Every structure is written in structure tokens, then in C-alpha cells.
Image (spheres, rainbow, N blue to C red):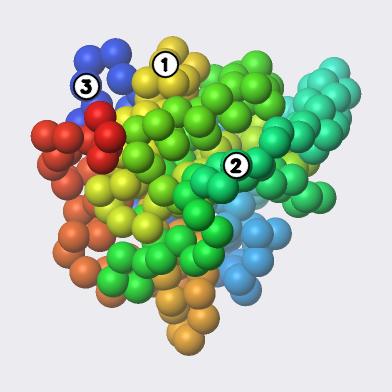
């Protein structure tokens, strides 16, 4: 068993992923692959870091497999057709905005914003995140379910944003299907708890991360990890991404 699953999940809850441990495993077992990183989401190292857990053993158990070779081998024509239908429906969806709830759709991703317009804000310069990997993303992530999740987050007092990437190939083979951005660690925990409740029984794994600045520019969590950023994180953020932060007695502001 690979050491990327944290044994902190409550009975019946989806296990959290330890992306720091997974990166260490990749560096130890596929060092040449992990040198292929220039800062894009097409980098073989970045793709290896976000590949779904179901494919991870095959990736590190081979000297030649990459994310792309595994996608080529696994992606069926029926899945491609289904994913095009799903992607089209998600991009076509529209919901009436309110002053504190907005649906966003463009060519690259779809998502929502909870809270008034303007900057989300940062927690000591970092943006905490939560990742949800779904067992069947195309049934769990319908426009109505995602919008309902946004409305539920608004009800519990969350402020932040969420997105998932189009095309669907990314969701099918990467673990970070639905990403929620929060302005504080506490609200990241709130978003995670709300997502686990809203999508109960449909989530395979959860994960946490932070976006931050590295070498003078803002980068996403996985580029941050690949650049050696974890060691620079203040202890509260290291604890957050490693699931060492205790849950507050009150998970969300309005619950």
C-alpha cells in the first residue's frame, strides 16, 4: 500500500490524501519523471502528483509509465463520448446570480463564488483549499447538485469560491475533481465538512492544500509542492494540509 492515505478518517468517511507523502514517494521511485517540471499543468511531474489514487501504484511500479500513457491506455471511446456530453451540459448551465452567489462558466472551468464581489482574501498570505475526488464525477457533479452545494455553503456562512476543470478527461483521471478555495483555515474546514455532508456516499477521497507565493509568483498547491514549498509553510498550514488541525466545535459560522 502506498503511503499517501492518512488514517485519520472517521468510520465510513472517505480517507484524506497526503499529497506531501505522495510527492516523497514519487521522488524516491520515479526521480527522472519528477524532474520534468517547468510550472505548467502539462508537466509530467505535475500530472503525476494529481493522478487518481487508483492509478498510483501502476505509475510508481513502472520505469516508463506516465500520466499520459495511463490515460491513453485507460480512456475508452464510450467514456470520451460521455465526457463530452457532461462537459457541454456543465458549460451551458446558467443560474441567476444574487449579491452573494454567482455561477461562473468559461472555456476552461466552471464553478461558483460565495460572498460579495472582490478579493477572497488570504490567511497570512496563503489561500487554503479543499479537494474532493468523486467515485463517479459525472453523476455527482450535475449543474443542479453543484449549485445546490453553493447555496448550502452560503447558508452555513461560508465565503469563498469553487471550480472544476473542463474537459472532463481531467476529472476522470485526476483526484482534484472539485476544488474549494477559502480565505481562512477555519473556512476551509467548513467547506470540507459541508461537502462531505452534501455529497455523502459519492466521494472517494478528500485532500487539502494551500496556494501561495513561491519564487516571487503565486502558484497553485501542486506547483507549490513541486517547488519545495511545503517546508516553508508556517506550522498551522502544515498541520492543515496534513490533517493535524483539530476540528473546531462549530464547523461553520452559521451552524
Which mark is first along the chain, 2 or 1? 2
Q: Is residue 41 left or right of residue 135?
A: right
Q: Position of residue 182 (x, y in %)?
A: 40, 52
Name which residue lies at 55% across and 59% down.
Answer: 117
Name which residue lies at 85% across and 25% down.
Answer: 85
Q: Is residue 107 left or right of residue 7?
A: right
Q: Is residue 112 above or below residue 20?
A: above
Question: Which residue does the numbered mark 2 point to in the structure image?
Answer: 98
Displayed quadrant of residue 184: bottom left
Residue 10 marker? 3
Q: Are marks 2 and 3 in contact (CB under 8 Å)?
A: no
| Mark closer to the observer (3, 1) | 1
Residue 200 marker? 1
Name which residue lies at 17% across and 46% down.
Answer: 244
> In this orientation, does residue 225 appear?
no
Q: Is residue 19 above or below residue 197?
A: below
Instruction: Kindly state the secondary structure of the residue where label 1 is placed.
Output: loop
| Mark closer to the observer (1, 2) | 2
CA–CA distance between discs 3 and 1? 13 Å
Return the residue nearer the eye: 49 or 218.
218
CA–CA distance between discs 1 and 2? 27 Å
Q: Is residue 155 above or below residue 130?
A: above
Amino acid at each position: 500500500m502506498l503511503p499517501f492515505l492518512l488514517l485519520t478518517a472517521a468510520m465510513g468517511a472517505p480517507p484524506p490524501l497526503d499529497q506531501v507523502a505522495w510527492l516523497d514517494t514519487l521522488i524516491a521511485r520515479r526521480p527522472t519523471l519528477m524532474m520534468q517540471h517547468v510550472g505548467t499543468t502539462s508537466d509530467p511531474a505535475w500530472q503525476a502528483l494529481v493522478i487518481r489514487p487508483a492509478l498510483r501504484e501502476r505509475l510508481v511500479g513502472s520505469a516508463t509509465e506516465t500520466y499520459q500513457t495511463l490515460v491513453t491506455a485507460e480512456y475508452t471511446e464510450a467514456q470520451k463520448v460521455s465526457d463530452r456530453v457532461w462537459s457541454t451540459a456543465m458549460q451551458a448551465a446558467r443560474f441567476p446570480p444574487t449579491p452573494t452567489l454567482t455561477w461562473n462558466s468559461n472555456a476552461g472551468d466552471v464553478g461558483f463564488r460565495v460572498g460579495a464581489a472582490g478579493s477572497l482574501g488570504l490567511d497570512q498570505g496563503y489561500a487554503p483549499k479543499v479537494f474532493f475526488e468523486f467515485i463517479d464525477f459525472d453523476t455527482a457533479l450535475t449543474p443542479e447538485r453543484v449549485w445546490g452545494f453553493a447555496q448550502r455553503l452560503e447558508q452555513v456562512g461560508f465565503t469563498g469560491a469553487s471550480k472544476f476543470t473542463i474537459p472532463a478527461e481531467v476529472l476522470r483521471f485526476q483526484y482534484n475533481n472539485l476544488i474549494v478555495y477559502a480565505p481562512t483555515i477555519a473556512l476551509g474546514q467548513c467547506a470540507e465538512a459541508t461537502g462531505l455532508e452534501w455529497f455523502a456516499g459519492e466521494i472517494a477521497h478528500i485532500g487539502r492544500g494551500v496556494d501561495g507565493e513561491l519564487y516571487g509568483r503565486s502558484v497553485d498547491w501542486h506547483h507549490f509542492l513541486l517547488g519545495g514549498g511545503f517546508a516553508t509553510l508556517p506550522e498551522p498550514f502544515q498541520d492543515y494540509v496534513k490533517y493535524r488541525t483539530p476540528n473546531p466545535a462549530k464547523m461553520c459560522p452559521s451552524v
